Each structure stands twice: as structure tokens, then as C-alpha cells.
Amino acid sequence: MSGSLRTVRGMTRRHIRIARLAAGLTALALVAGACGSSGKKTSTGASSSGTSGTTKQAPLAAATLNESGSTFQLPYLQEVAQDFKTNQSSVTINVNGGGSGKGRQDLADQVVDFAAADGLPKAADLPTYKGGGLLYFPTVAAPITVSYNVSGVDKLQLDADTIAKIFQRQIKTWDDPAIKALNPNAKLSSKAITVAHRSDSSGTTQNFTTYLKSASPSVWTLDAGSTVNWPADTQAGNGNAGVAQIVKSTDGGIGYVDYSDAKALGLKFADIKNAAGKFVTPSLAGTSAALEQATVNADLSYNPLNAPGDAAYPIATPTWIIAYKNQTDKAKGAALKAFLQYIYGAGQDKAASVDYAKLSPNILDKAKAQLDTFLIPA
């Protein structure tokens, strides 16, 4: 598959992604390779030049890196893993998805070399990570859309309180007065609302519910987390693709879906009222506006949800690669560092092609600096 994906970049990759979504697939494994050796630790890694365009790196030793985690950033990781291999043919990166919760657990159990997650480990869980201290590397960001499927409704506006009531099943039909008040010109029928949500432990769920807890504190009662006790009369889908499929196939459906998958399936999504009182369409520009307002913590965690500013999209969502600071395999450690260098160089310029926003300069500069804290065997 990887050869055909590279053949016609703009069109063929999008078509293959749509086929993947339609089939319910959420993983792409690249061709297998060999592993490296271990030894004494030092800070090292492949070099790269530039922050955009082609990233030049010295050839690396053969290594295979295995990932699991976020389906939110999965299309981006698939893209950059493929392109990284064109520069480093001896390195294979197997991108497997499965949800942020799975990625965090797999990393804790040391069955993968790095995890992708849209939510970071809780402080109480850090002792369970058998490989020691963790490093959090932001990659890209994107909107979480509130995607819907309502016959005859091509434009929809929602605020946080109304979204909260819909997903808590306090609003059950599309002609509810609260929805009509926000959409006086829409042809809203008495069609029943079908709520779709994630069945797996999910960073998308964590960010969506964190947004509702922040923006609608007096209405949202289900708390925030990677899993939530959803009402019994809702439907669960595995991964972002699973939720997207429920919405796509259900007249009256609504669900929270990452921007990349929502666009790939041609879903309609609502404009969301932001903290400044403006209705904003999910977009990369709106995500970038939110990132510019975010405070970056020392561990590179940050929260762009419900950010201030007229242009900020309120459910702008971060995502990270999580890895052990102390790498035990020289070839794998060097390959992982080089892959992150690639993400922070040419990989940032590829983000928009798969519907993700680049990191803002204040986040990107700190992420690059953190690369030097990896401890890799000599």
C-alpha cells in the first residue's frame, strides 16, 4: 500500500483514507526492518538542518519503531512516517493507532517504542511506566468537530450549553427550542437525535469533555476524561473513524470527530460559539489562533481549549508523542530522535496536507530544545 500512497500524493492518499474509514480500518503498518543494539548512555542523535522544506539527515542504522495510540493524529503520523522512510530507508515506523488510552498503556507496559496521545498520563499513573521518566513532544494540532447528519440542514450553529445538553440526552430532537434559537433560519425537523461517542479510551473524548467542563460548567455533569459514563441510549464507535461512520450512516446523528476524518468522509460540522461569543467554523486557522493563546508548561503540556480571541476555534486540540527519556537501544533511540527532528522540520510543512495545523513558534521552539534531553546509548 505504501508504494501506491506515494504515487499520486494529493488525490490518491485522500481516496485511500476514505476507503480505510469506510472499512473501519484505523492502522497502517509499514514494511518491517531490523533492530539495533544497546550500550552506555549519552545524549546523541542524528542531525537535521532547517525548520521547513526538506530535512537533511545523516543515514541511520537499521531500526524498527512500533507505535500505538491516538487515532486523532493517526493520519498525520502515517504521512510523516512514510515520508521519513524515503529519507531514512533503513528505519521502519509501524503506526498502529488504537486510541490514546491504549497507547499510554502499551508504553507503560513497554510493548511499543513510543505512544501517540491527545491526553497526557495522570500524575498518579506515572509510577506504572516501567521505563522511567517520560518526555512529551507536541506534534501538530487540529479541531475536534461536532459533526452531524440532518437532512436539509447544511448550516448549523451550536454553543457549549446546547452541545452539553445534546450529549447528555437532555435535548433529544433536532427541533428543540434551544437548537432553533441558535438556528432561526434552519429547517429543523422533529427527527430524533442519535448521539455517537467513542467506545475506547480516547484523547478525543478527553479533550471534548474537558472543553464542555470548561465552557459549560453549570450544564455539563458527566465530568471530563478519556472515558465517560455516557447515557445508555447513545451509540459507541471505535476510534474517530467509528464515530464518523455512525454519524455518516444515521439520519439525525451527531458526534465529536477529528477534523481530518470528518473532512475525509465529507461530514457536515457545526460552527461553535467561542469564548469571545463568536461562532467559528472548525478550521486550521482557528486552531492556530487558539494555539497562539496557549501557555506552554515546562513539560510541554498546554491547553488551547476554549481559548480567548475572536478567531479562536474553541475545541482546538493538542496531541503529543510520548517517549521514555532514557532510551535503552542505540539504534532505536537515534531513529526516534531523528523522526521527531523530521516532524519539527519538514513534517510541520506537511501538516496542512492531511488537515492539521502546525505548532505555533512558542511551542515548536520548546519542543526542538527538548530533543537534546534524550539519553541514548553510545
Image (tube, helix red, strand yellow):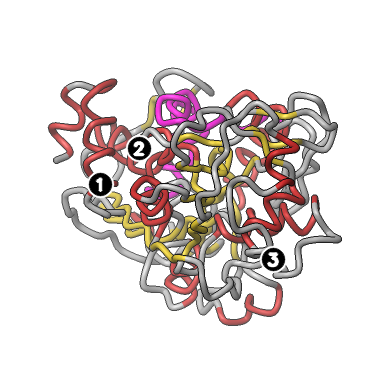
Q: Position of residue 280 (x, y in %)?
A: 68, 28
| Quarter assignment of residue 65 | bottom left
Q: Nearer the viewer, residue 211 or 245?
A: 245
Q: Is residue 378 above or below residue 101?
A: above
User: As drawn, is 144 to the left or to the right of 289?
Assistant: left
C-alpha gap between disc 3 and disc 2:
27 Å
| First reached walking from the N terminus: tag 3 or tag 2 | 3
Q: Is residue 230 above or below residue 118?
A: below
Q: Secondary structure at mark 2?
A: loop
Q: Nearer the viewer, residue 355 or 217?
A: 217
Question: What residue type is disc 1 on?
Answer: Ala
**Magenta stretch containing residue 11, yes or no?**
no
Q: Residue shown at 47%/34% (left/top)?
A: 268
Looking at the rendered image, the disc whose residue lies closer to the viewer, 1 or 3, is 1
Q: Answer whether residue 334 is visible to the viewer in this image.
A: no
Q: Secondary structure at mark 3?
A: loop
Q: Is residue 279 above or below residue 190?
A: above
Q: Which mark is residue 22?
A: 1
Q: Nearer the viewer, residue 45 or 274?
A: 274
Q: Which mark is residue 359?
A: none
The residue singled out by tag 3 in the image is 224
| First reached walking from the N terminus: tag 1 or tag 3 | 1
Question: What residue type is disc 2 on?
Answer: Leu
C-alpha gap between disc 1 and disc 2:
8 Å
The residue singled out by tag 2 in the image is 265
Q: Which residues are magenta?
A: 335-362
Which quadrant of the rendered structure holds the C terminus? Answer: bottom left
